[in-house]
Each structure stands twice: as structure tokens, then as C-alpha cells.
Image (cartoon, helix red, strand yellow):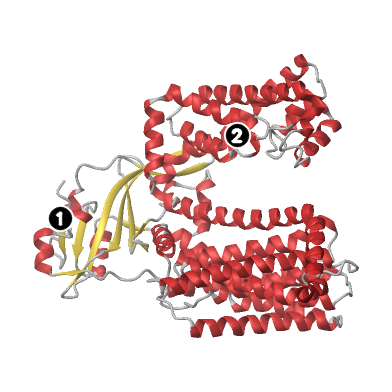
Amino acid sequence: MHGAWFDNTLAWIGAHPVAAGLLVFLIAFCDAVIVLGAIVPALPLMLAIGVLIGMGKLSGPYAVACAALGAFCGDGLSYWVGRRWGEGLRGVWPFRRYPRLLERGETLFRRNANKSLLIARYVGAVRPFVPAIAGMARMPLPRYVRISAFACLSWAILFLLPGWALGEAYDAIAVVADKLVLALAGLVVALAAAWAIVLYTWRWFAVNADGLLARALRWSQTHPRLGKVVRSVIDPSRRESASLLLLACCLFGFAWAWAWLSGSLLASGGPLRIDHDVYAFMFSLRNPLADRTMATLAALGSAPVLGSGFVTAMVWLLWRRRWKAALHWGVAVAVGLGLTEALAAVVHMPRPPTAAAGFEFPSIAVTMTTVVFGFFAVLIARELPGRQRVWPYLLTGVATALVGFARLYLGAHWLSDILGGMLLGAIWVLLIGIAYRRHSERSFWMPPLGWTFYGSVLLASFWFTPRIAPATLAQFEPPPPTHTMSLSHWRSSGLGSGHARFDLEIAGPMDTLQQRLLDDGWQIQPAADWMAVLGLLDDDLAPSERLVLPLALDAHPERLLLRRVDPRTHARIEVLRIWPAPTLLDDGTPLWVARYGTMQLRKRLQILTLWQPRPPAHSLPDDLRSLADGVSLQVRMHPR
């Protein structure tokens, strides 16, 4: 599951462990240098280095020393720059154009000079600037060196430690749960991206709102006809002008993105190449535990969940006689649903292979999640004080990202369907939001409405999503194999060299196969769920009660997962995984593939006890080699 770059990096570090220390030094040094440190992504790089330490590719103490020394030298350079230029540094680009870069570090330094050097080491926004502020303030060099050395050493240890711990557990987890980890990591990345886009867009506009408002008013004066429209939206005498301008700017950006996406799809006559690439990548991540999680998250965009929040909040608005708010929200949801349904009926695109049901362009679930959460954010954001106004928009981004990523993972949509749904929902929310903000001046007490809406959504989610998850998974099962071969051809050559990784290939009914294995002492492990996974943290759980994590083959979970205790020790088991074969027999005989292995019970990180695969066996047990004796089964074994 790893890219060539990852394997090449591991090979290079393994071959040059001393030179790798120079790379660690440079990363930490660049992260600490004034201005440059604001660009270098130190956290993910240090996490990756920590993983390599845990995997034994790099010496831990050596890497910590190189990182601490690099950070200390980078901080020292920043301190020298501040001491050399002093206050004149404010007149140098980029500080002349962006004075806030120094102002944030200066504010922290003024509160407590010593503590600021420690705190800044762990805060990326001010890390490269506080040492320069210390130099500008002429902090005595001996005092600076003592504090900086301690801060850099502690930073190196703490920033490498999470990846170090992850690398320690990598060997145990990667073999049995690499796809699960990657799927969950992808979800975290999607949530982080949605959070960052909303938050930093909000912050950028908060800093530049006055300048944008002045430019818009100047433009409206030089364009009499269109200027009337602009002035009607951003009248300076209205307190809503700044927020209306933000909505208008976002509307312009989303409309441009929607036009570009629609034009690209029309020009290509179907899904884009990136759609197929993302679909293939997501399909490769399918595994049983992640499947259940994503099916549950996908249900957040279902009608019962969104409808519960919408109806309860609508009842509250009507009870409080907020007629305009209720009218605009009702129009937003009704027209948004109708518009999406109309587009799905008019626009015809080839569906993803796993989208046997629930397919449309754009995604109705994603569009309506954006509309319901988005307009509610527009409705209540202005009632919140100051910086708290961003929270409803952040929750909208999180909810939309959860639903979009889950449906993308399940193969319900192409990536363009998800993006199209987000953009269409955002455009409609912004249009109706601008109309509402222009005609509604009444303020009202927001907390009861906020608790009503978000509380209803949470309650509906906890009640409804676990119950609908199995049906959702059934809708998006991976497609069956299309390649067929004759029984005689399979008997002579098997599935072929492309499937040589299977220890057994078995033709025959599953009931017969299962009974034969049970008679030989194998035991069936039920399908694992997340409650069973949490049992890995329980030290008192007996080895027989500890689950073996499931694996998927071409997105199909095991049809049968069996285990048998090694008679020599209860801390070792034999495991047999059986899947439907990726090829069909033309006479209709069921064909299965199986992998055999042994697993050792081991504890990782002092908190996680799980079955870890042992080196592959050189031969199969006698009972598996004679599996077809006396029963209506046909078995082929791996050549080894």
C-alpha cells in the first residue's frame, strides 16, 4: 500500500543512517529560521521521521540530537537577525507589508520574555519570530542560550515522540490493519482540510474586510449600472455590510469553481481522470471495519437525520414567530432539494462500478447536508459575538466533509459528484443567505435555537445511523468478478500466476468446506466490530477472546475467518482466511481462495495487545493438505 517514494526513502535512510541526521538537522533548522519557518511543514515531517525511528531505520537519540541542534541553530540565526537589525527589521519586506508577522510574536514576548521562548517553540505561527523579537529586545545572550537550548531539546523529543510510538506499533498493525489506518487517516485529512479552509478564509477576510469594502464601493461608483446592485448589498450604513461582502465574495468564488467543474465534465463527456484515480484509490482502501464506519458516517446526510434537525429548528422558529427566518430556511431546503433532483434527472453520467443505488450528479446527500447546515450557520452566525461567529461555518464544513468522504469511500459517487454537491449547495446557501441578511434586521437569542438544531441532529444520528449502516453497505457492495474460466482449466493451472499469493484454491459448496474445517478443530471467529476492537486495550481479556482483525480482498471481507489454538502454547494461533475467488467457474461451481498463517500474541506500546503475524509457514498443516479427502471438494495448493 506504500508508494515508491516511501520505499525509496526507507531504503536511502537504511543505507545512509548518518547522512539522514543531516536531513533531520536541515528540517529543524529551516523550521526555526525567521520567515522561512512559517513555510516549512515541520509537524508532518517530524512525524514521518519519528515513524522511521520507531521502525528501526534511524537511531532515536541521534535523530533527537540532530533535530535539537538544528532548531537551536535556526533560533540562533533568528536571534542574530533581530539583534543585528533591531527596529529596522520592521521596514524590511515582508514585515513592511505584513506587520502582523512580528506583532503576534512581540505580544507574546511582552507578556513574559522567558516563557515566550518556550511557548513559541510549540506554536507554529510564532515559532520563527519570537527569537528575532528577543534579539530586537536585546535579551542577554547567556539567558537566551539557556532557555533556547532547553526549549529546542524538549521540542525535538515531543515532536518526534508520536511518530516514534506509531513506528513501534507499525509492524504489528500494518500487516493486519494498514488499509484501516489509511482510510481513517484520509478521513482526518479531509476533516482537517475542511476546517482549515473555513477557518483561514474567515480569518483572512476578518483582516482584509475593510479594504475589500472600500474597493467594492469605489468600483460601484465607477460602474453606475452594476454599482447599484453592489451598493444595495454592501451599504456602508448597515452593520451587515461586512458579512454580506464575505458572503458575496464566497458566492463569486464558488460560482466560478462550479462553472469550471461543469465545463470540465461537459468537455470530457463523463467522469474526469482524477475521478477514476480517486475511485481506484478509495476502492483499494476498502476493509470491513472502515466499511462499517463509513456507512455510519454516510447516513449523516440521510433524510431522517437532516430532517430531524430541520423540522425541530423550524418548529422553534415558528413558535417564536421568526417568520422571515422560517420562510427563507424553508425555501432554501425545498428549492435546494428540487434543484438537485432536477440536475440528477437531466445530467447523465456513467456511474461508479459500486454505485448500484443512490447515484446522482451532484450528490443529493452532500448537497442537502451543505444546504441544511450551511443556511443554519448563516441564520445564527450574526447572533454570536466576535470570533465565535466562525463556529457554525466550521461545523458545516465538518459535517459536509464527513458525508462527502464517507460516500466517496463507499464508491457511491465520483469525486466530481461530491465537489459538485458541495459547490451547488454552497452557491444556493449564499444566494438565499444574502437575501435573508438584506431583509432581516431582527436579532434573537441564539442558544436555544442552536441547541435545538444541533441536539436534534446528534440524537437522530445516534439513533438512526447505526440502524441504517447495514442497508447502506448492502447498496454499495463491490461488483462481482467478471472473468470466468472452465473447471478443467482451473484444475490444470489454477487461477494463474497473478494470484499465486493464495495458499489454497477450493472449488465446492461453502457448507461442506465449513463443516470439514470445524471437524478438524478450527473455530469460526464472528465478524469483528468496533466494540471488539476496543477489547485489544483490555489486559484481562483471555487470548481466546482477543479478535483477529479482519482483512479484505478486492474490497470483499472474509466469507469465513477461522482460528485454531496452537497446542504447544495459547499465545500462538493458526488463522485461515477464506474469500470468494476473483474468478468465476463457468459451470457455476463456487470457487474460494484462502490464506493460511500463524499469529503470535504481543503487546505494543504497553497498551495494545493483539495478534501479530509470524513469518510465513513453509508448508500447510496436514489437515489442510488433505482437505478434499472424502468430501465433495476440489483443492489446489500453492506450489510451495
As drawn, is 151 to the left or to the right of 464? right
Mark 1: few, some, or many residues within 10 Å (few <14, many ≥20)?
few
As drawn, is 497 to the left or to the right of 599? left
Q: Earlier in the sequence, mark 1 or mark 2?
A: 2
Q: Can residue 153 be seen in this view?
A: no
**Type of residue at label 2?**
Phe
Q: Where is residue 116 in the image (x, y as percent from the top left)?
A: 78, 30
**Type of residue at label 1?**
Ser
**Which residue corresponds to mark 2?**
159
SS for tag 1? loop
Above or below, comparing residue 185 to residue 354 in the picture: above
Mark 2: few, some, or many residues within 10 Å (few <14, many ≥20)?
many
**Which residue corresponds to mark 1?**
626
As drawn, is 356 to the left or to the right of 330? left
Residue in the picture at 48% in, 55% down:
183
Above or below, comparing residue 480 to residue 138 in the picture: below
Q: Position of residue 577 (x, y in %)?
A: 31, 56
SS for tag 2? helix
Among the 4 quarters of the image, the one containing residue 138: top right
Q: Can residue 616 be seen in this view?
A: yes
Residue closer to the observer: 35 or 465 = 35
Above or below, comparing residue 502 to residue 156 in the picture: below
Residue closer to the observer: 435 or 165 = 435
Q: Position of residue 387 (x, y in %)?
A: 80, 55
- From the viewer's perspective, is the residue at label 1 or at label 2 nearer? 2
Q: Position of residue 604 (x, y in %)?
A: 48, 38
